Image (cartoon, helix red, strand yellow):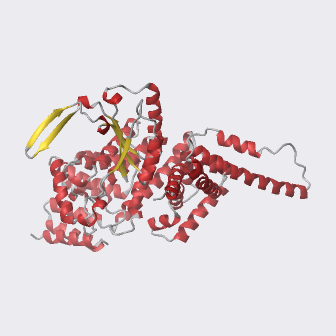
Amino acid sequence: MDVAEEARRTVETVFRMERVRLIAGLARLVRDLSLAEELAQDALVAALSEWPRTGVPDNPGAWLMAAAKRRAIDGFRRGRMLARKHAEIRRDAEEGRDTSIEQAEAAMDDDLGDERLSLMFTACHPVLSPEARAALTLRLIGGLTTDEIARAFLSSEPAIAQRILRAKKALGRAGLSYEAPRGQERKERLASVLEVIYLIFNEGYSATAGEDLIRPALCAEARRLGRILAGLLPEEPEVFGLLALMEIQASRLAARMAPDGSPVPLTEQNRARWDQLLIRRGLAALERAEALGGANGPYALQAALAACHARARRAEETDWKRIAALYDRLRETMPSPVVDLNRAIAHSMAFGPEAGLRLLAEVEHMAALRDYAPVPAAKGDFLFRAGRPAEARRHFERAALLSRNARERAFLLKRAAACDA
Amino acid sequence: MRVMVLVKATADSEAGIMPSAELLEAMGRFNEELAKAGIMLAGEGLKPSSQGKRVAFDGPGRRVIDGPFAETRELVAGFWLWEVKDMAEAVEWVKRCPNPMPGPSEIEIRPLYEMTDFGEAMTPEVAELHDRVRERTAGR
C-alpha cells in the first residue's frame, strides 16, 4: 500500500469509528436524518482532503463535527436568506435578531447523554414497522450500505432504499426531538429497540450454508448492537437478558449445521465446537440481568433456558427439571402456544412421557398448533417412550406429512418405522 | 474479526509497580469507550512474570522453570480480546489507548484464527479430527 492509499484508509477507518456519533449529533441539530447523513458525508470529504496533509487531529470526532457544523450553518444561512426574501414579499417585518445559529450551537453543546443512544431510539421508533426499524438501524448504526442490507434481508436494493427513505420521512413528519427518551417512556420504547436487535440476530441465525455471507454476519452485528446498548444502559436488565440470549445462541453457530448444510438438533450437536468465550460472556450477562432484578424478563428467561443447555457439557447432563421450571415461568411472562409445546417437551424430559402427554393434551387443540408438525412429532415421542408404539407410529407419520423440511421428514419416517421393531 | 491486543511488559510492570491513579482513571475511560463501541469481549491485567512459571517441552521431557523471565520486551503485562471490523480499526483503537506504562511501551495486535482461514484444507474429516482433540482437551 502506498502512502496516499494508507492515509486514505486511515481517514476512512477513523470516520467509520466516529460516524454514528456524528450522524446522531447532526440529527439532533437539523432534525432530518437524510440531511444529517449528507452533512456527515461532507465532513468525510473534508477530512479526506485535509488529514493526509495535516495528520489525523487529536480529537477527530470534534473535528468532523465542526466541519459538518460549518456546512450545516452555511445551509442555514442560505435557508435564512431565502426566508428573508419570502418575508419581504409578504411584507412581514422581521422582529429582533435571528438566533437560529446560536440556538443550533447551543443545541450541539448541550449534554443530552450519549448520541449513539439517541440514534438507536430514533431508528427504532415505534411509528415505524419492525422491518423498517431494522433496515434503518443497520444503515445508521451498523453503517451497512443499502446493497448489503438488501442482501441480508433477501430483498432488492431499490426496495430497501425505498424502505429507508420512507422511514426517514415518517420520522421527519413525526416531529421528533431525535433524543433518547427518559423515565417511563424509555422503558416502553426500549422494548422496541430490543425487538429490532433480536430480529436482526434471527435473520442472521436463520441463514443457511451457502447463502451470502452477509446474512450470518448479521448475528455479529446484532451482538455488537447489544453490547453497545449494554455499554450505554448498564442498569437495564432486559438489555443484558437479550445480550445473554444472543451470546449463548451464537456460541452454537459452528455446531448447528452438518457439513452438508442440514441443521443439527441441539441435543446432537458436537458440544466441543460451542464457543466457550461466548458462553462465558452470555452467562455473565445473564447474571447481570438477574442481579438487576430482571430474572423474569422474557429475554432473561429465554437466556436462562439457553444457559441450561450451554452449561451441560454432554446432552445427558442437561438439567431438564430446571428447564421445565423456567418454561413454567416463561409461560406466565410470554404466553404463546409454542412456549406451551416446548414446556410439555421439557416436562416430559424432566418427569417422564406421561407428564408431557398431560400438558400437551391441554394445548394441542389450539388453532395455532393445528397442522404444526412439531406437535405430532412430540406426541409420537412421548407415546413411544410411554410404551405405546402403535399410537406413536400414527403421530410420527402425521408429523412427516406436515413437515416442510425433507431432512426432518426422513427423520420422522425413520422414527415411525422404528415403532414396528 | 477477533483480535488479541497484547500490552507488552516493561521494567516497571515487571517490578510490580502499580499504575498511578491518573493512569487508572484514563484507562477506565478508555475501557468505557471500548464497551460503548461494542468491541470489547474480554480484558485482564497480568501479574509480573516473577509470579509466573513456564513448562519447557523436549520430546517426552517436561521441565518447570520459575519466573521471572528475561527478555522483558517479549513478555505480556495484559491483554484485551476485541471484535472489530478489520485490523485498521484495531490499530486506530490502540492509538487512542493511553500509554499503559509510565515510560515508553508497546502494544501488539494479533488476529485470531477463524475456521474460514483454513479454507480447503479444513475438510470435514480434518474438522472432525480437530473436534475430537478439542473434546479431549475439554476433559471428556
Q: Quick check: A378 above or below A106?
A: below
Q: Residue furthest left?
A: B60
Apparent side of residue A48 relative to residue A297 in the rendered image (left or right)? right
Q: Position of residue A402 (x, y in %)?
A: 30, 72
**In the image shown, does B136 or A322 lie closer to the viewer?**
B136
**In the image shown, does A388 or A308 lie closer to the viewer?**
A308
**In the image shown, does A239 or A139 lie closer to the viewer?**
A139
Q: Is residue A399 visible?
A: yes
Q: Quick check: A155 above or below B16?
A: below
Q: Quick check: A412 above or below A309?
A: below
Q: Is residue A180 visible?
A: no
Q: Quadrant of residue A397 in the image?
A: bottom left
Q: Position of residue B48 (x, y in %)?
A: 29, 30
Quarter containing the C terminus of chain A: bottom left
Q: How many marks?
A: 0
Q: Position of residue A148 (x, y in %)?
A: 48, 65
Q: Position of residue A158 (x, y in %)?
A: 55, 71
Q: Quadrant of residue B120 in the image?
A: bottom left
Instruction: Identify the residue shown where x is 31% and y is 62%.
Output: A364
Quarter containing the N terminus of chain A: bottom left
**In the image shown, does A129 or B25 lie closer to the viewer?**
B25
